[in-house]
Image: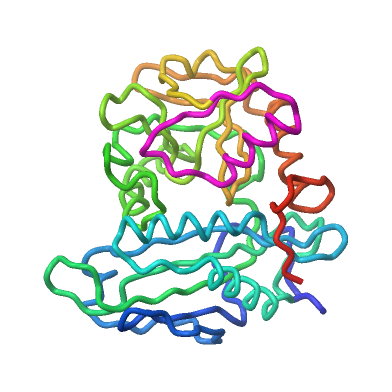
Amino acid sequence: MEKKNIEWSKLGFGYMPVDYRFVAHWKDGSWDEGGLTKDATVTISESAGVLQYAQTCFEGLKVYTQKNGDIVAFRPDLNAKRMQDSADRLLMPKVSEEMFLRALDEMVKANAAWVPPYGSGATLYIRPFLFGSGPVIGVAPAPEYEFRMFATPVGPYFKGGVKPIKLLLSAYDRAAPHGTGDIKAGLNYAMSLYPGDYAHKHGFSENMYLDAATRTYVEETGGANFIFITKDGKLVTPKSSTILPSITRRSILVVAAEMLGMEVEERKVPFTEVKDFAEIGLCGTAAVISPVGSITYDGGEILVPSGMDSMGPVLTKLRETITGIQEGTIEGPAGWIHKIC
């Protein structure tokens, strides 16, 4: 299939509508069949649950053109499961894995011309989301729901690609103990907008958030998990019930331990320990792995030994392995690659 006439290598991380998206409706206790539409607009009641009480969750995954020409997704079954967990917590009807994967396959096949070619540095970003579309006034779950999935071709999440970024230790909290930090709810991201804007205006790419209970342990940023590399080459990642379970992070842990022979540790990470790590990275679907060069906090600045010029050697190897699996140049664990066409 002939690809769209786009300068793929110059794409940023933004929204560009494609030809088709998937939509399904839940009413009277069940989902309809759902299907593709060209209509990119959403029409709902002014009293819809999503508008009144933020009853919504979403996912993010990428579709790649592999070296052999196959169009694939990376572990979309885990996105389906995580969306189900989010739906449970927000009292919304779950989207089955079968519907989730069917929507993905149908939509990507219909938009194959929008999937960036291999080697372009771009990908097709997929955004599934679920929201309360039925009207409510009293605080209660909505009576009707809509599941949608759209796609957009994207370039790097951070401007400049995989260059070390500067973080600010946020004075704000991302998620409360026993709250919703471990699900991909829209309300969590709304809470990060104000501190995120403050960070950007002061020259930082992102915030580093500490745990809300004690403000002593590292949690995550507004949109990515942390991975730390010790001076002796061990991978350490924060463990907390208020951290979103990143699919990329979980995959990196497997790659590090089983493919690269690294020692891996998932535990609480005190902020006082951050200065001792040799490399620091952020990981997530959008960025894969982004290196951190410095962290500014009230009273000082941590300069990561790997520097502000390039990604450190261990994070580089991890990133090359993960992206190699996604692009089909490295064989990964069974079941990680979902072939679409």
Residue 109 sits inside the magenta stretch: no
Give the left or right position of residue 73, taking residue 273 as reference.
right
Residue 264 sits inside the magenta stretch: yes
- Residue at point 73% right, 52% down? 326
Residue at the farthest right position:
68
| Quarter of the image where one finds residue 208 | top left
- Residue at point 50% right, 15% down? 275
Vertical comparison of 332 with 214: above or below: below
Of the 4 image quadrants, the one containing the C terminus is: bottom right
Vertical comparison of 145 with 283: above or below: below
Q: Position of residue 4 (x, y in %)?
A: 74, 76
Is there any visible trace of residue 311 in the rendered image?
no
Vertical comparison of 55 with 134: above or below: above
Of the 4 image quadrants, the one containing the N terminus is: bottom right
- Residue at point 64% right, 13% down? 231
Q: Identify the magenta region.
A: 236-265
Vertical comparison of 262 with 118: above or below: above
| Quarter of the image where one finds residue 129 | bottom left
Instruction: From the viewer's side, name the closer residue of 33 and 68.
Output: 33
- Residue at point 11% right, 70% down? 138
Q: Position of residue 264 (x, y in %)?
A: 61, 25
